[in-house]
Image: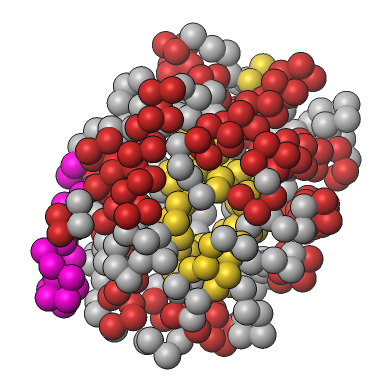
Amino acid sequence: MSDSKLFQPLKLTPSITLKHRIAMAPLTRFRSSDEHVPIVPLMKEYYSQRASAPGGTLLVTEGTFISPTAGGMNNVPGIWSKEQIAAWKEITDGVHAQGSFVYLQLWALGRAALGDVAKAEGFTVKAPSAIAIPDTDGVVTPEEMTIDDIKQKIAEYAQAAKNAIEAGFDGVEIHGANGYLVDQFIQDNSNQRTDEYGGSIENRSRFAVEVVDAVTAAVGEEKVGIRLSPWSVFQGMKMKNPVPQFSDVIRKISERHPNMSYLHLVETRIAGNRDEANDNDEERLDFALDIWKGPVLIAGGLTPETARKLVDEELKERDNVVTVFGRYFISTPDIVFRIREGIDLNQYDRSSFYIPKSPKGYIDQPFSKEFENVYGQGIKAWI
């Protein structure tokens, strides 16, 4: 498949040129310590493996909590302390040693926080409105955020972005998808406020836009991307008509910050962290692509063939599309090499996705024999 546009370089920012158009999705794996510090030997090897030859790959990290009160899950990394920054620095050094690039995904859970974890860690679950995620075990009805709460959280996004750059990241991705805090403000089934942060399309866009404003002011437009999922039903989301609302968000961000790294969009075919397909032809991303002129990352249950069709056929007129793989990046550390050479990918095993602090299913996934013949025995040849 080496003649596909997948393997043409793409200039993502003035300082980042990708060698190809296959990126690694943000993937929660629960391999950090109980104190939310990345476990360096484990996580450095994991990311370095997936940054390996041919290099020039864009990796987006797992969602990373921007502050102690942004969390609500165990064994997820954070980016607020010196210890966390130092641990991440070792990981980014490992990625850069492979000639690849890595963005940190900035994450705040809002109402998706688990109540028992929040209680154990000493904070109150807060969200745009006092509306719990329906039919979901472990969550609680959140307190409605005050204006002061909102301003504080925006400031935490900005500080987390600064910390990420200090930790050696090439940029940051704001997690605005899948029913977490930013998405909760955007959509009316989770935001029923009547102040300047709710009640209308413009007001529901405000938090997302102000987060982008703050983060770009902190680290520069070219170091910031944002991920959105207009059609996702995960965690009780998908408002009745997402198009006008998400069009407003995307238009405002693109007008205010035309030099941002990218817009990362989730297609309809995958709902959050589940495998259910959705092939509704009416639920398309065209409206977003018509507004956003910069680089676009597209995720959603892609295979090598559907990724090729996306860049070579469906969006062939657009020269700045990057395809994003998730589960197959977990199972296949040499995925870029395999797609280029037409080698089958490893099957993934969901049972090993979320084993806290474990190397099983994390750094033990096999490289292809063809890769090892060219580059040596797996990642140990580089570390």
Residue 82: x, y in percent?
43, 22
170 relative to 235, above or below = below
Q: Give coordinates of residue 292: x percent, y percent.
A: 74, 64
Q: Indicate whether residue 363 is drawn in magenta.
A: yes
Q: Quadrant of residue 78?
A: top left
Q: Image quadrant of residue 124?
A: top right
Q: Position of residue 328 (x, y in %)?
A: 33, 63
Residue 348 appearing in the image: no
Is residue 351 left or right of 164 when viewed as pictured?
A: left
Q: Is residue 144 left or right of residue 2?
A: right
Judge left or right: residue 295 versus residue 6: right
Relative depth, front residue between 325 and 11:
11
* Residue 65 vertical position relative to residue 320 in the rendered view, above or below: above
- Residue drawn at x 68%, y 36% as measured from the top left: 218
Q: Horizontally, is 147 left or right of 78 in the view? A: right
Q: Is residue 374 visible?
A: yes
Compared with 94, 374 (above or below) is below
Percent across and percent down for residue 274 are 43, 52
Residue 370 falls inside the magenta stretch: yes
Say which residue appears at 28% left-offset and 32% top-offset: 39
Query: Where are the magenta residues, as a range?
Result: 359-378
User: Magenta region's main secondary structure?
Assistant: loop
Q: Residue at x 66, y 80 (%)?
A: 318
Quadrant that contains the N terminus: bottom left
**Number of labelled discs?**
0
**Residue displayed at 88% across by 30% down:** 196
Q: Residue furthest bottom?
A: 3
